[in-house]
Image (tube, rainbow, N blue to C red):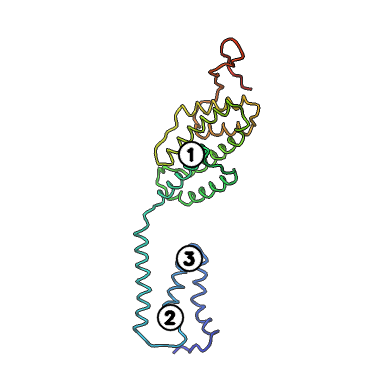
Amino acid sequence: MLPAITGFVLLCAVLAFVLIPAGILMAIPAYAVVGLALALGFCVEMSLQTSYTADLAAIVNSNSAFVLGGVVALLVTRMMRAIGTQASARRLIQATHRDLADLAAGRSHPHRDQWTSRMMDRVALLLYRQPRFEPRPQHEFADALEDLRLGVNMIQTRSIAPAMSKRAQDALSAMFASLAVHFRALGRGRVAPLGEDLLQKIDIAIGEATACTATTHACVAAIVGLRQTLYPDAPPYRPRQTEQADPALPGPTEAASVT
């Protein structure tokens, strides 16, 4: 027969043979579930009391409730989990598109650091879902990084827009309006291919921004970044001729020079 346990120290020494390995397993993420199940199951099955009571009905009742409760919880969890990896990734991408639409429409005014922090969190969430994507995923991991650059470029452009000329502000407003429509459609789950109209508006905005003396190099680089991110395969930018001449100058319409 085993020796009787007559003190708290001896009880801790005996329980340590099971609970210490269980605690080590709980500290390892790959075996945390196993360690938690071992610790809970051992403590519940032991049912330590201040005094020993030989009651078979009470022991069977508590142990069966523990086992059946775990089984029922597992079944309910499996039945209620309806959002898969791809659906979760799609929701993250659509949330980013809605934020980009609000940013383009002027409804949201986050700082650059705030946008970067928010997008880095979403990039991290997509990173853990990347290995489970299908062979031809609809949402690549690189899409989140492109959205991060788009948001930073929009914030940089809007920060200097109030100091630009009226023509440059109008060109930027037309560009941002088209961007808001495009990302609003993507945020609602619609297919919104990029057209030549938006590319022309971006090129006009680049031309007006470079012609404005209040424009900084960072702002021009931000608008060019929008063009390169949205249209990576588009032809190189070329200055466009203005449609209206300066009313103070007589004669035919002259092309606006870009330095």
Compared with residue 51, is residue 125 higher up or lower down, i.e. above or below?
Answer: above
Residue 214 percent across, percent down from the top left = 65, 29
At a point 50% along the width and 75% down the height, the residue shown is: 19
Q: CA distance from mark 2 to mark 1?
A: 58 Å
Distance CA(mark 1)–CA(mark 3)? 41 Å
Quarter of the image that includes the N terminus? bottom left
Q: Which residue is mark 2?
A: 47
From the image, tell me which residue sits under label 3.
32
Front-lying residue, 153 or 138: 153
Q: Which residue is mark 1?
A: 101
Q: Nearer the viewer, mark 1 or mark 3?
A: 1
Query: The C terminus lies in which quarter of the figure?
Result: top right
Q: Residue at x 59, y 19 (%)?
A: 256
- The tally of labels here is 3
Q: Secondary structure at mark 2?
A: loop
Are dots 1 and 3 in contact, CB under 8 Å? no
